[in-house]
Image: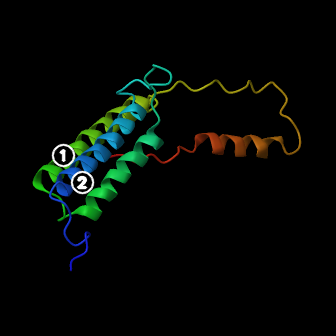
Amino acid sequence: MTSPAANPPPDTAQRNTALFTGLVLQHANLASIYLGRVPNPETGKAEVNLEAASLFIDTLEMLEAKTRGNLSPDEAALLGETLTNLRFAFVQAANQAAPPTATPQSTPPSPSAPAPAGPAPESQEAAGEEGSHRKFVKRY
């Protein structure tokens, strides 16, 4: 006697292919929303959130690594092409979101103005250091 799990119905492979395709396209669509390529359905506006987009791209990369060798040629091509397109869109969005390199600097206070006494210079240095650090952004 064989168990039902040992002999899956013939349409299980087709169902799994459809589910895999849906999962890849769902993640790609969400990444596209966060890359600003597709309007957010809630607001109707294109919004860029590189961290969220990176999460969906990373998830698809993990899926590609974990399923390598177990996908049909069509499934592998879909996943590979989707990742290539999303990586390209991520680079474009990251370059558009990057601040211009030649930003005008504010003029320093005039030397005739009295400098505040006490711990104020240290707090200004700390604030300047925190503001000057650029958050790491993953680029593809």
Q: In this view, does 107 lie to the left or right of 114?
A: left
Tell me the residue at 71%/44% (across/down): 125
Q: Which of marks 2 and 1 is nearer the N terminus?
A: 2
Q: Residues within 10 Å of mark 2 (few under 14, many from 20)?
A: few
Nearest the viewer among 91 and 72 is 72
For the N terminus, which image quadrant?
Answer: bottom left
Q: Which residue lies furthest to the top in this view?
A: 44
Gap between marks 2 and 1, in whole Å? 14 Å
Q: Name the residue under label 1.
A: 78
Tell me the residue at 88%/39% (across/down): 117
Image quarter of residue 6: bottom left
Q: Residues within 10 Å of mark 1 (few under 14, many from 20)?
A: some
Measured as percent of width and height from the top left, residue 121 is found at: 78, 42
Tell me the residue at 85%/29% (across/down): 114
Q: What residue type is labelled 2?
A: Asn
Q: Which residue lies furthest to the front in this view?
A: 1
Nearest the viewer among 44 and 96 is 44
Tell me the number on the disc at residue 16.
2
Element class at badge 2: helix
